């Protein structure tokens, strides 16, 4: 399969009055066609910033300062807003976290879907309506015509997220970015929405970047998983591999911090300390102050992401492997 | 588990109801049954988990128990007192024994008060000290218990991270040594690693101070981890109740089964 999206050496900085904050620090990602890449990490690790960068939605004071985002061999960073607008919604689209706030409360759901379609394809009223209703029924809503005429406040959270999905998929995008699409939903509704995204992804062979803080959700959805910490990818590997054989101490810590459904031990593992502030990053490895296996080198130098299929950004892990 | 079941009953809620009337002047009146006959008992030192989806009445139940919302009908027996019949000074006195931790540590702390004032407020209301020195001592002890640095006393909530703010909320809840703490989604707004720290803190406090928790959460794995008994709610009613392991390994009710099947497990 060919590569659809290739992010190379991406840096995003936020320029504040006092300092420059590196929110995304040298991120490299290759996404193949039809692949689902999960991005997992805690708040403030740069997951959503990465999504915004790909969508070209970064607004000052945040700015891409280095690197390129190649989508179908075109560098998205260099495109003008107008050129981006042609791509957004048609070739790349996005589902946001809050279905309550990302829909226009004053517009009928159907009209909102039509709006996206009309931006990219100049169709007549009747044709637009037909396609919008078809899109609504495609996301598993039974009474599509009724919902077409409803305003978002009359729908439940799950239904609203379905409308968002219909909107995102109306132009058959090649890349879909899901930024915490089920975080605001109940577990039972979450299960339905995840199933729907998976079904559509399978049917249309869309590539997906799936962002979540929930390891369980990621493990259900993703083929490959990238773990982010303080703006860097610290580990990236196949989903099975990362959950059964995590290598980076941060990934291991995160997995152990989740209340396990199977063990009876009462105290949960906690990673000591807290996520570093972006204006006071440690000199060496960004995780070193909280790491249990850190060696001297870790406090002085920044490790690189190394490995073949299972890449880890850790001196200790990489040294051990090259030694073996 | 059996030991706990035999221990003293701290709180007995029977047939608690909360109805809301809706419908404007010209519409037919409708009654929304937010709580429809909920009954349970809480023993000393145990954790009762309450799970269910949004809108099932979990938070209404929490607020009704401490009468932040006045229930429509039912009985709340706290210790040996009928909690619903209390008022004025007696109510204040009774509320010393039952405290609450809220979900959102960002909006539940007064932004204009320092940590010292926030944690000390329950002491002032309950007049639980003789002099300023004793008040300070109590505040400092509690801050140490929940793992807050004493040098942060004069800072404001916005200077803290989510996890630290939740610690302030916990300090405020436990400073009067309550018997019962109602935790309404205390870790939902937090990241996994911070969540682990707060859960560990709650478990340690329970061991040290013998507190009973009513632990409300939509996250079933957290509830399974912390609770001795679990109550599953749906549409204002309790659909299933039992010992945590029984509910999770052998759910009887259809709704509980759907709920459990929906959890995304890691592989």
Image (tube, rainbow, N blue to C red):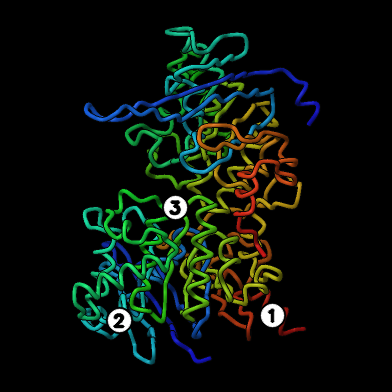
**Chain ID, mark 1:** A
Name the side, left or right, on which B109 lies relative to A223. left
Q: Which mark is residue A319?
A: 1
Image quadrant where one finds the N terminus of chain B: top right
Crowd class of label 2 (few under 14; some 14 to 19; many from 20; radius 10 Å):
some
**Residue B123: x, y in percent?**
47, 19
Query: Quadrant of residue B7 in the image?
Result: top right
**Residue A124: x, y in percent?**
19, 77
- B59 or B193: nearer the viewer: B59
Spatial CA distance of label 1 from label 3 is 41 Å
- A270 or B156: nearer the viewer: A270
Name the side, left or right, on which A82 lies relative to A280. left
**Chain ID, mark 3:** A
Residue displayed at 43% across by 16% down: B125
Spatial CA distance of label 1 from label 2 is 43 Å
Q: Earlier in the sequence, mark 1 or mark 3?
A: 3
Residue bearing mark 2: A87
Residue displayed at 55% across by 75% down: A301
Residue bearing mark 3: A184
Q: Is residue A129 above or below residue B252?
A: below
């Amino acid at each position: 399969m060919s590569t659809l999206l290739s992010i190379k050496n991406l840096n995003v900085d936020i320029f504040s009055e006092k300092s420059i904050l590196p929110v995304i620090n040298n991120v490299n990602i290759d996404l193949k066609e039809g692949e689902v890449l999960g991005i997992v990490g805690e708040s403030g690790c740069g997951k959503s910033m990465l999504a915004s960068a790909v969508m070209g939605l970064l607004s000052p004071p945040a700015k891409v300062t280095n690197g390129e985002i190649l989508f179908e061999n075109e560098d998205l960073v260099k495109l003008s807003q107008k050129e981006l607008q042609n791509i957004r919604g048609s070739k790349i689209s996005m589902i946001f976290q809050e279905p309550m706030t990302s829909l226009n409360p004053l517009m009928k759901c159907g009209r909102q879907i039509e709006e996206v379609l009309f931006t990219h394809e100049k169709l007549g009223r009747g044709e637009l309506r037909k396609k919008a209703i078809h899109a609504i029924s495609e996301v598993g809503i039974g009474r599509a015509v009724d919902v077409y005429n409803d305003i978002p406040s009359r729908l439940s959270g799950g239904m609203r997220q379905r409308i968002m999905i219909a909107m995102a998929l109306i132009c058959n995008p090649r890349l879909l970015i899901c930024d915490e699409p089920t975080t605001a939903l109940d577990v039972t509704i979450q299960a339905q929405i995840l199933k729907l995204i998976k079904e559509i992804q399978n049917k249309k062979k869309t590539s997906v970047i799936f962002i979540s803080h929930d390891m369980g959700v990621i493990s259900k959805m993703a083929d490959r998983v990238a773990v982010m910490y303080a703006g860097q990818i610290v580990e990236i590997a196949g989903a099975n591999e990362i959950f059964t054989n995590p290598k980076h101490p941060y990934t291991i810590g995160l997995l152990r911090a989740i209340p396990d459904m199977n063990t009876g031990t009462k105290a949960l593992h906690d990673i000591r300390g807290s996520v570093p502030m972006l204006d006071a990053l440690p000199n060496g490895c960004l995780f070193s102050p909280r790491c249990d296996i850190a060696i001297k080198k870790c406090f002085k130098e920044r490790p690189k992401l190394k490995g073949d299929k299972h890449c880890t950004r850790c001196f200790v892990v990489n040294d051990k492997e090259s030694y073996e | 588990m059996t030991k706990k079941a035999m221990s003293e009953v701290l709180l007995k809620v029977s047939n608690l109801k909360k109805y809301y009337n809706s419908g404007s002047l010209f519409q037919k009146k409708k009654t929304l049954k937010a709580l429809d006959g909920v009954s349970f008992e809480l023993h000393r030192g145990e954790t009762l988990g309450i799970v269910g989806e949004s809108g099932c009445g979990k938070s209404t139940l929490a607020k009704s128990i401490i009468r932040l919302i006045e229930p429509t009908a039912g009985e709340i027996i706290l210790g040996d007192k009928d909690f619903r019949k209390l008022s004025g000074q007696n109510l204040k006195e009774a509320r010393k024994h039952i405290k609450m931790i809220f979900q959102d540590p960002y909006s539940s702390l007064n932004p204009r008060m320092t940590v010292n004032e926030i944690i000390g407020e329950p002491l002032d209301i309950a007049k639980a000290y003789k002099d300023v020195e004793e008040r300070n001592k109590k505040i400092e002890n509690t801050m140490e218990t929940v793992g807050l640095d004493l040098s942060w006393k004069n800072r404001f909530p916005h200077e803290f991270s989510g996890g630290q703010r939740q610690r302030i909320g916990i300090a405020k809840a436990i400073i009067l040594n309550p018997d019962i703490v109602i935790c309404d989604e205390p870790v939902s707004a937090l990241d996994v690693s911070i969540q682990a720290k707060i859960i560990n803190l709650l478990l340690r406090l329970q061991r040290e101070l013998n507190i009973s928790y009513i632990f409300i959460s939509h996250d079933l794995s957290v509830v399974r981890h912390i609770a001795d008994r679990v109550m599953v709610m749906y549409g204002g009613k309790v659909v299933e109740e039992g010992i945590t392991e029984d509910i999770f390994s052998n759910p009887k009710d259809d709704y509980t089964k759907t709920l459990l099947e929906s959890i995304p497990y890691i592989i």
